[in-house]
Image: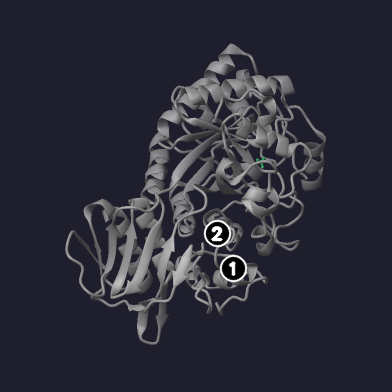
């Protein structure tokens, strides 16, 4: 239910919002919690203290007093749901620490300042998500981002209740994860990045640090080892496991247009073109290598999913492709994880039962693409919906955007990125067969954290709302989102997030 006046500056907009008195924040304001939600309360107190300069004392296991911010676990409610009520202080209640954490993220968006100082806008909120999987993908293969840079990214996206970070860990230009027994993957395959930039990789400890940082923010890491194509970094390290590059029309056209080099077997690949590389299929030594990689990655990953890639395998014969994705998905399933694959893998007819598909066609599927995606559902799996012409964060905003690409039906404005519904993309797939949504940020042209910010904000909040808020929920209009996105700017400025000041939004004065 809407409150009938200007919407609160909340993204994603909650299930139900009604009016309540605001709460003044002072040096006396405390965060009060029980032991179980100590971590969530700590992060809240730290964030509010940082934003406001107030002390925000954290106290565990005491009776709340008037004016306190209270985190309380109670019976009932969904895994991620929560309620938040302002009045005599702020009360956040949830059935789980995860729900309480989302409540704290809502509270952070309610903090504002007037002539008398900081306060929490008044609201009586109940809230729970539409989809369980609300992801963002970061391509750390085309360009490498350090542990600290990834953690900063996690902080930014978790404000919008994103709960999955998909790390695209390997591609033609670089291999970013240490694998025991295969040191050249990182020593040679990890040294490079697109455009000749410096590479890098995560040690097992680095990867564990990212996972722990994400987990403290109720975010699950999904690692992707892209196979059987997008594997030129393996060629650089262990050429015995890969085929010669196979050129294709698009690759050659991209190389000519961008004045970039074509791939050469055994040499690092620093260009942007795709679809030429392939591991050897049906070769026992290659199968053993791939199985070992997926088994180790699964063992390092506490989350339930491991992504095998499977996209743009123009350099792999279709029968070999089917053989490979059958083998790779079975190897992942054997670890107890659920395999995930880009939608092309659905065409193979060979996937392990229950494999989750990631749809990256357009909002209106191109011929054959919806069929490939439906195969996952028919095989007992589900779909993640990532329409490239709306959810790809690396698409240019308009023709003048210097960063990013435009192959997904041209640039994607902020309004366009919000103009779709996950349940209306793949015909014949209903809401219950959709795990959720994901917004990928590919990094061919994205070289720095500032580039990440520029492409992620302001489109991510609307995409996060599509994943969280009901299609017919309150404030689900572009007119409302536009206003609420503008209201994010002070927090982004305070956090040093260099968002794109899109002319589609009436921003406050910087
Ligand atoms: C993709 O964009 N190649 C999944």
Kindly tell me whether residue 445 is visible in this rendering. Answer: no
Q: Where on the image, by quarter, is ligand 1?
A: top right
Please tell me the numbered disc located at residue 465: 2
Judge the density around disc 1: few (<14), some (14-19), many (≥20) Cα neighbours within 10 Å.
many
The reply to whether discs 2 and 1 touch (Cβ–Cβ < 8 Å) is: yes
Judge the density around disc 2: few (<14), some (14-19), many (≥20) Cα neighbours within 10 Å.
many
Residue 333, placed above or below residue 381: above
Residue 315 appears left or right of 351: right
The quarter holding residue 383 reads top right
Residue 365 appears left or right of 158: right
Q: Secondary structure at mark 1?
A: helix
The quarter holding residue 113 reads bottom left
Give the position of the C terminus as an image quadrant: bottom right
Of 433 and 278, the residue lying toward us: 433
Which residue corresponds to the image point at 61% horizontal and 70% vertical from the top-left? 482
Task: Report whether the residue tagged 2 is closer than 8 Å to ligand 1.
Answer: no
Which residue corresponds to the image point at 32% horizontal and 56% vertical from the top-left? 40
Please tell me the numbered disc located at residue 481: 1
């Amino acid at each position: 239910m809407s409150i009938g006046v200007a919407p609160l500056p909340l993204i994603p907009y909650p299930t139900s919002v009604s009016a309540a008195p605001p709460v003044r924040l002072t040096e006396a304001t405390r965060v009060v919690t029980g032991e179980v939600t100590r971590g969530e309360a700590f992060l809240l107190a730290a964030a509010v203290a940082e934003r406001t300069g107030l002390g925000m004392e954290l106290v565990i296991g005491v009776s709340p007093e008037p004016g306190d911010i209270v985190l309380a676990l109670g019976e009932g409610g969904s895994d991620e749901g929560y309620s938040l009520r302002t009045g005599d202080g702020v009360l956040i209640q949830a059935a789980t620490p995860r729900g309480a954490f989302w409540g704290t993220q809502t509270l952070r968006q309610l903090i504002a300042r007037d002539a008398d100082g900081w306060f929490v806008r008044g609201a009586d909120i109940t809230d729970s998500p539409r989809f369980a999987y609300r992801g963002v993908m970061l391509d750390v293969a085309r360009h490498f981002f350090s542990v600290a840079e990834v953690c900063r990214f996690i902080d930014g996206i978790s404000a919008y209740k994103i709960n999955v970070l998909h790390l695209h860990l390997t591609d033609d230009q670089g291999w970013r994860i240490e694998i025991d027994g295969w040191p050249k993957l990182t020593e040679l395959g990890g040294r490079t990045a697109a455009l000749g930039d410096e590479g890098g990789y995560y040690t097992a400890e680095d990867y564990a640090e990212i996972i722990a940082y994400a987990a403290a923010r109720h975010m699950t890491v999904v690692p992707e080892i892209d196979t059987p194509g997008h594997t030129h970094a393996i060629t650089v390290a262990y050429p015995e496991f890969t085929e010669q590059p196979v050129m294709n029309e698009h690759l050659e056209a991209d190389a000519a247009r961008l004045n970039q080099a074509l791939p050469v077997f055994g040499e690092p690949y620093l260009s942007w073109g795709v679809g030429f590389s392939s591991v050897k299929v049906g070769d026992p030594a290659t199968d053993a290598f791939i199985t070992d990689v997926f088994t180790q990655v699964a063992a390092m990953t506490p989350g339930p999913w491991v992504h095998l890639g499977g996209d743009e395998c123009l350099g792999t014969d279709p029968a070999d492709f089917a053989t490979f994705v059958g083998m790779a998905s079975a190897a992942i399933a054997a670890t107890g994880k659920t395999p995930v694959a880009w939608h092309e893998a659905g065409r193979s007819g060979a996937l392990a039962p229950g494999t989750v598909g990631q749809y990256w066609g357009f909002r209106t599927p191109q011929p054959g693409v919806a069929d490939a995606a439906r195969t996952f559902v028919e095989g007992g799996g589900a779909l993640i919906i990532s329409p490239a012409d709306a959810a790809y964060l690396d698409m240019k905003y308009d023709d003048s955007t210097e960063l990013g690409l435009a192959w997904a039906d041209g640039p994607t404005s902020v309004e366009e990125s919000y103009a779709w519904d996950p349940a209306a993309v793949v015909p014949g797939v209903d809401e219950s067969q959709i795990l959720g949504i994901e917004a990928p940020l590919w990094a061919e042209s994205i070289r720095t954290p500032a580039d990440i910010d520029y492409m992620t904000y302001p489109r991510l909040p609307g995409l996060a709302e599509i994943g969280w808020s009901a299609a017919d929920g309150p404030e689900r209009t572009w007119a409302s989102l536009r206003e609420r996105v503008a209201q994010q700017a002070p927090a982004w400025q305070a956090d040093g997030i260099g968002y794109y000041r899109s002319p589609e939004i009436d921003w406050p004065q910087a």
